Structures are given as structure tokens and as C-alpha cells.
Amino acid sequence: MNTNTSSHNGILRFAFMRSLCIMLLIVLSTFFHISSASALILQKVSHSNSQTTVLQHNSSQHFATAAAQTSEISISIDSISPVITSSSGFKASITITNGSDEDANNGTLTIATNTAYTFVSRSDIQQWANNSVSIPTNNTITQISVPHVKAHNATTIDVDVPQDNNTLQTLISWGPKPLLISYQSANRRITRLQSFITRSGDGIHAASTPPLKITAVTSLSANSWSYNKEVADNYITDPDGSGISISENKTNSTENNSSSNTNIATNTNPLANHVVTLRNKEKSLSQKLIAALTAHPSMQILADPTYLEAIGASPKIAAISQPGNFDISAYTHVADNKYAAAGVDTSLWSAQTALQQYKNSTKSANDPRAIALEGQTQWSIRSLSIAKQQGYNYAISTNTSTSQDDSIVYTNNLSVPTNSGDITLLISNNTLSNLANGKATSEYAKSEETSAGRLARFIAQSAFYQMEQPYKDRNILVYFNNATADTINSFMSSIENATWLESTDLQTLASQTPVASGAEASSYLNETSPLNESQVTVLNNTLDTLQKAQSNLNRVFTAIITDKKQTSNDDFTTKTSKDEWFENLNNTFRQLALHSLSANENTRISTAKQASNFVNSIFNKVIINATDSITVLSETANLPVNVTNHLPYPIEIKVSSLTNSMEIVTSRISDVYIQPHSDTQTTFTIRVTTSGNTNANISLLDRNNTAFSTSKIINIKSSLQISDKSGLIIIIVAVVLGILGLYRQFNRVKDPDE
């Protein structure tokens, strides 16, 4: 039994050692095979038909973004020729980033394609972008020697391949082609990045097909607004001397607005335009943006009229959006009266107001189409009904999905029935719009992490859309959300060079037959906008802040400023009446409040605080001037308090004094009347019963006993002396009582039992 067991164990050990040796031989042979193959590739490096500039630099900032791909070697596309024509050649700028702790030795960058390959489906394209499928790329465009890349540094390779390149000349079929960018150094495994190039029909002898219609639209609105405190303070204290003329604007507003139309806000006053402005950086960017839009007239501009007013420019626009990019989608989650209490009623963002503001700012007689933009969340039946009610017959959506999204691309217009009437919803193409707005098609599409990579995919995807159904008339919407000048220049230049695309205007797109209407169109939308709990909380908090500020502003007019005169000789006449002054301040606040409810997150966060600061700055024009401390040496004393009124109109208010001690107290309330740009003194009586120390809180109250402005803390010290008459009387009484007590104690008759 033992012998058999030993034999069996020996056989097992032999089998195990044999398997181990076989596995070792396989690993070694594979290693040498790969090394030989790599050496063979390096030996066959060819520089024919290419002109290449190699730039090596140390850039920790560039490294930080590029190395996000991997901790080893990564490749990114800084620029690329997405469209190849018969005379274009190929240009690109490729960055190789070494994210490891070890230098990468001299290596080779290879750019190759497959000139004969044709993508057969959308999933085929996506799989290539995701690096989840291997397509042979045997046609080398260029190979470039790359010097060593130091650890945690990057090298940029500029590629310029002429038009007579052999591979480019063999691109004889139009459409998107796979592009493989690979890098390998002697001490590193190969790194690949999969992207696209697209051959246009230029110079190719093939049957031409109708181009795919594309409508590129960009919104023109602010990312953030600035509150000009200096201008605001000047007008608050001296409206006549502020240099801001209101009369001319009021004349124009009266001429242009119909008094019977209550849905037009007549608050486009110069004060708001001077106080609510763009930051200097954004003004500078707006100039570059207008230049880019002028260079590409096929880009359709959907402009916020308040932005046009701020930049003082009049670009050729296709339509206007709601003023201040007001979030109509969120509006349906809160009662109307809460918005009105916050200073933002529907007249501020109606289509009629948008048109009036556009005409006032541009002096144009045109009546552009008004199109409502989507807010934080997708449109709903209810929010579209509100938009229609406010005069918008069209709306643009970037989030609405229909059941046909996975089929062949089509003109995605819906005619949506609402309680206020039918409204046309223009739905943008999700894939192309995301690429245009800086979003990759998936987290695995590494080449799309840069703008140039997204552009290459954009062009390839649009070509595939045309090839899917080349003879069907379609018009797709691509929405650029607040695009930069660089984005517009790069994307629109490529679109203009794409022979398979035909740019159309918004009017052409809007006139297309809807793909669905009635109940079918409604089925694609929710009844209400799906705002999440966090978004609703933020919205309510913003409205509460604005509502409080609006209430405080109203108090200035109703409970602080007065029409009373102290004497019959008082003359406070100003060119700007009290009512007009308050109206201009109120309209400025409403403009800030409107921007606080924008669909743009950056604008919402910054402007709500500015609206509160604006109202507080009016309160703070009435200030308390008093000493920081006072010492009381007697039972009673006077506490003088000066109050200064920097407002241009007289005020009638109350001054309150309250201590935190029962032994040291002051009189409570003092009524004061203060003329404009002057001060007055009021006096509080201090009463003390003992030595000590306390603080008196001096505050300003309006006529409804509600505090405003900044309070003042005054320290009161009491050093009560016995030489005072009151102290002397107390001492005498104490002595007399003491003597009487002693006398009674010695002269009283004791009881017998004591």
C-alpha cells in the first residue's frame, strides 16, 4: 500500500514539473516573439512623404491633465485635420505624456489608417472609439522618431503631412475612417489612441448624394454678472449727480410699449444696465466671440437680450431667448406668487419683454423669433405650457428623448399640445451636441477627452449619418451651449469644409414637418420637470433670499423715507422724484433677481448674493455715529447718538437703545427726523443703581419697528460715588436703623421663661 502511494506521488510530481516547464517555455517564447516583432517594427520606420517638427518641453500643468488617462504613457490630440480633401494634406499636434517615475527611451510615433474600411453601424463607430474592437490599420500615414520623454513630463509632436502622401492619395472612398495613433519606446509597451479622419467627396469620382442638412445654433448669454457697487452707491445717494439719464429711456419705453399690454416689463432703465454689468474678462471674451460668429455666419445665434444690452454689440441673430436665461423648467416647481414676491414676475422674462429689450439695445426694427431655452432639467408638458403662455411658440431641448433615437437620424421636431396652445419643440441631436459641448460619447473614448479629438469624432459621426440614408431629406439640430470663440472657429470651419453637410438657418429647421404631434408628442415628455430634491431646496432658498431683499427694499420707500417737512421752509426738490428714484432702484434689483434665477449655475450662485448686497447698501446709507464707550459717575447721565442720512430724501425713523443689565439701563426709543444728506442728534437717558459695566445696543428701526442698517455697541461703565446725595441719604438711613436696632436689643423686657 505504501509502495503504491509513493509511486503515485512520484508520478504526480513528475506531471507537475513537466507542466511547469511547458508553461515557462511558452512565456519565454512569447516574450522573445514580441521583442523581435517590436524590433522589426522599429527597423521598418519610414519618414517618406512627411514633414515633422518635434517639440519637447517640461510642462507639469499639461502633464496633470494628460496623465489622467494612465499612470504610464498616454497620448492626447491637441489639434487635427478632421476632414481630408484632395489638396488638404494631414496636420496634427500630438502630445505624449509620461506619467511614470521612469524616463521613456527614444521611441516612435505611428499614425495609420485603413483606407478601404467602411463603418457599417453606429455601434461599429462607438466600439472603435471605445478601443473595444480591433480594426487593421495597415496604411501608415507617417512614422516619427520621438526623443526620450522624462518622467512626469510631456513631449508635443507637430505633424505636417503633404497632400501627395501615398496613404492620403489612396483614400479614394469618402466617409469616416479609423485612425490609430500609437507610440512605443524601447523600454515601454505600445500605447494606442483610436480616433477618426474623414475623407470628403472632393476629388473622388463617385455618384454624389444630397447633403445632410445641419442647423448649428449657439446661445449667446452671460456666464456671470457683476454688481457695480460704485455706480449703485452714486445713484443711491445722488441720483441727479450720478450722470445716469433716465428720461430718454423712459421716453423710448413709453413710445415702444403699449399701455394695454401688461406682459411687457418697462424696466429697461440705464441704472440697471450700469449696475448689472459683465465682468471685464467676459467683456473681452465677448469681443472674440462676436468676431468668431461674424466669421461664420452659418452659425445661428440665439441671443439673450440682456446680454446684448451689456456688450453693446449688435451681431446678426437668428432668434432671441428668454431674458436672463431664466429657468422656465424650474418655474413650475414653485407657486407663482413666490416668484412675484421675490421681484420676478412673468413680465420680466416674457417673449414680449425679450423683443422690447432687443429693440431698445440694438435700435433694430426687426422682430426676431422668440425661442425658449431649456433650464436645469428637460422640458415638461407644464413648463412648455408656461413658455407658450409667455409668448414663446418654439422651444429648444437638449435632453428630450424619443423612441426613434436609435434609428436612422431624422428631423427631430415635435408639435406638443399644451393648455396654452401647441408649441414646437426643436430637439437637438444628442451625440453631436454633446461633442460640441465638450462631452465625450463615453468614458472609454479616450481620444475624445480633448476638443480636437471630439471634433474628429463629430465630423466622422456626421458623415456616417449622411451615409445611413443619403437620399432622405433630414435637418438635424446641433446646439452649442455658450460656445467659446475657439470652439466656434474649429467646429464651424470643419462643418463648412464638409461636402456632405449643408448648413441651414433656424427658420428652415423650424418650418420642417414635425416627426410627431398630439398625444404621440406628449408621450415623450413628463408632466412636470424632474427637478431633484437638492435642486428644489436650492431654488426655494434663493427665492427666500430674494423675497427678503425685496421686502427690505419696499421698506425703504414705505417706512423709512418720508414726505414730511420739519419746517415750512424746507425745500428738498430734486430733478429725480422720490417715486422715480425708487422705481429705478427697484428695477435694478429685479434685474439682479432675474439673473439669480438663471438656468446657468454660475450665474445663480453669484447674483443672488449681489441682489441682497444691493438692498443692504441702501440701508447702510443711514448710519449711527456715537462714541464706543461712556463712563457714568452719577445716578443719571445722557448718552448722545448721532444719526446720519446719506439718502437724497428726508427720513423719519426710530433709534433704539437696549442694554443687557438690570442695574444699568437706558431709555428705550427715540423718534428722529433727518433731512437729506445731513445728520441729527438724539439723546438717551442712562440710569444706574450700582457700579458696573454693560453694553448698550444702539440700532435703527423703521416706522414699523423693524431693524435696518448696522447697529452700534456702546460700552457703559458706572462708578457710582458715595458722595452723591442719594448715597449720603442711604448711609444716614442705614446708621439710624442700626442705632435703633441696638437700642431695642438692650432695652427690651425679657419674658419670664427666657
Image (cartoon, rainbow, N blue to C red):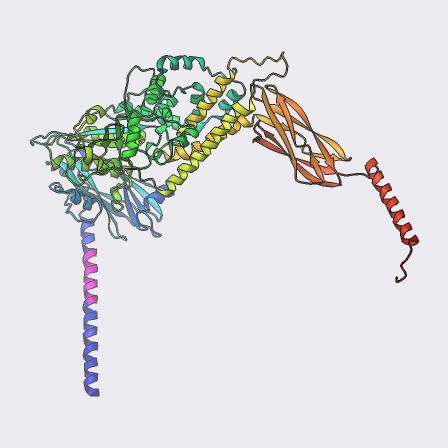
Q: Residue 34 lies in magenta, yes or no?
A: yes
Q: Which region is colored magenta?
A: 23-35
Q: Nearer the viewer, residue 627 or 216?
A: 627
Q: Residue at x 68, y 32 (%)?
A: 667
Whole-percent x, y for residue 91 in the image? 23, 35
Direction from residue 103 to residue 631 in the image, left or right = right
Q: Main secondary structure of the magenta part?
A: helix
Direction from residue 535 to residue 130 in the image, left or right = left
- 407 relative to 39, above or below: above
- Residue placed furthest toward the front: 752
Q: Nearer the viewer, residue 676 or 554?
A: 554
Q: Nearer the viewer, residue 262 or 678?
A: 262
Whole-percent x, y for residue 241 in the image? 52, 15
For residue 495, what is the image quadrant?
top left
Whole-percent x, y for residue 118 in the image? 12, 41
Q: Nearer the viewer, residue 651 or 433?
A: 651
Whole-percent x, y for residue 57 in the image? 34, 41
- 675 relative to 454, above or below: above
Image quarter of the C terminus: bottom right
Q: Is residue 500 visible?
A: yes
Q: Is residue 724 visible?
A: no
Q: Residue 310 lies in magenta, yes or no?
A: no
For residue 419, what is the image quadrant?
top left
